[in-house]
Image: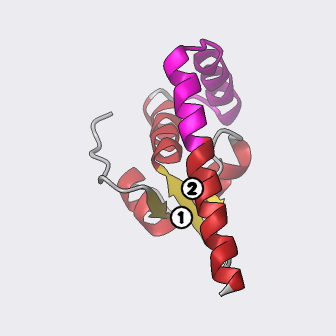
Amino acid sequence: MDVSIPDKTYFRIGEVSSILGVEPYVVRYWETEFKSVKPVRTRSDQRLYRRKDLEELLIIRDLLYKDNFTIRGARTQLSRRGSVASPEGAADQEKQLLTDVKVTLRQIREILS
């Protein structure tokens, strides 16, 4: 990836679209077409994309725009890439799960206060 991703945990859709060089509606569309991109929703229903989501979107953008795959072809390529499991991937998933729990707990705390 030739794009530098800022050192942040969460990115708003405007930041993501700027980094990717596409319009926000394109990012929302890709989110519906590629189930591996799952942004967290805030109480006000804003999307917050994690670093993992942004990296996945960069791969999707390259598959669609540089490699000229269709949506279906890009989905196939991503599933082939994702079918190779690694211990590091499992650790990343566990870390992501803990991060999601943390965000949810913060949202619950905001509701209760």
Q: Is residue 46 left or right of residue 21?
A: right
Q: Nearer the viewer, residue 27 or 52?
A: 52
* Magenta segment, prevailing SS (helix, strand or loop): helix
Q: Nearer the viewer, residue 51 or 111?
A: 111
Q: Please rate how many residues cluster around mark 1, counting C-alpha atoms within 10 Å: few if below 14, some from 14 to 19, many from 20.
A: some
Q: Is residue 76 left or right of residue 81?
A: right
Tag 1 and tag 2, C-beta contact below 8 Å: yes
Identify the residue at horizontal 63%, vertical 32% (top origin): 70
Label drawn at residue 24: 1
Q: Position of residue 29 (x, y in %)?
A: 66, 54
Q: Is residue 4 left or right of residue 12?
A: left
Q: Is residue 28 above or below residue 14?
A: above
Residue 80 is inside the magenta segment:
yes
Identify the residue at horizontal 32%, vertical 48% (top origin): 5
Which residue range is magenta in the image? 69-96
Give the SS element for disc 2: helix
As drawn, the residue found furthest toward the bottom would be 113
Q: Position of residue 101 (x, y in %)?
A: 64, 54
Where the N terminus falls, by quadrant?
A: top left
**Mark pair 1, 2: CA separation:** 5 Å
Circle 1: residue type: Pro
Q: Quickly name the residue at label 2.
A: 27
Q: Nearer the viewer, residue 112 or 20?
A: 112
Q: Please rate how many residues cluster around mark 2, counting C-alpha atoms within 10 Å: few if below 14, some from 14 to 19, many from 20.
A: many
Identify the residue at horizontal 60%, vertical 69% (top origin): 106
